[in-house]
Amino acid sequence: MNQVFIGGSRMITRLPQTVQERLDKLIQNQLPVLIGDANGADKGVQAYLAQQQYPHVTVYCMLHSCRNNVGQWEVKSVEAQKGDKGLTYFARKDEQMARDAAYGLMLWDGQSNGTLNNMLNLLAEDKKVVVFLSRDESWHTLRNADDLTKLLATCDAVALTTFEKKLNLSARMGAQQLDLLAA
């Protein structure tokens, strides 16, 4: 069955009605959900799914230790590589979810490196990503680097510089894609 990787920014702590409606469709279709254990969007989605008593959830955690598992669902532990820390440490479970999922649903504030990294990972796996952009409550469907470039064009220069520094964005997307952002 098509598993959905749901992730998002730690700064998103409240789920707007439009996000709840999208989650209700997943529940109605009985789609298995893969979700991380972070505070913010992960915890908010977990709380909503638990409130709905939705059983088809797997929480991905690092080393058998979950920060959040609101519904006491099945846990999939992911092991870190020696020397991993910070974003790289927690990105290991996100990479696994991107591999295991059929597509992604990301709740993004336009600033989160981790959420953008998830989008990049899913696209690298040739998987569709549906993105809820919280700052204007808009929905975007990403199927390729061109779609992501259009979404990134809505970000400010400071965010783009940070993405480049932390995620090596130009190498991962291709220089021609980022040239479009500079134009």
Image (tube, rainbow, N blue to C red):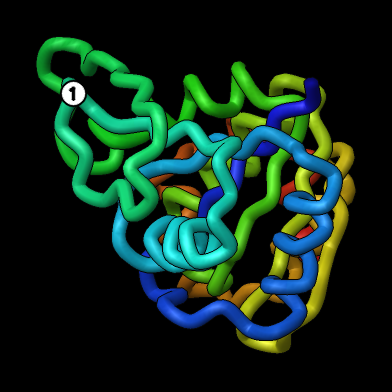
Is residue 174 visible to the viewer in this orientation of the structure?
Answer: no
Is residue 43 visible to the viewer in this orientation of the structure?
Answer: yes
Which SS class for mark 1? loop
Identified at 59% across, 27% down, the residue is 98
Nearest the eye: 95 or 21: 21
Where residue 181 sits: x, y (%)?
A: 75, 61
Q: Reply above or below: 110 against 120.
A: below
Identified at 13% across, 11% down, the residue is 82
Image quarter of the C terminus: bottom right
Image quarter of the N terminus: top right
Where residue 120 sits: x, y (%)?
A: 63, 37
State the residue position of label 1.
64
- Using the rendered view, name the quadrant where residue 110 is placed: bottom right
User: Which residue sits furthest front?
Assistant: 53
Is 144 on the left or on the right of 156, as rendered? Answer: right
Nearest the eye: 137 or 156: 137
* Mark count: 1
- Using the rendered view, name the quadrant where residue 47 is placed: bottom left
- Using the rendered view, name the quadrant where residue 119 is placed: top right
Is 175 on the left or on the right of 49, as rendered? Answer: right
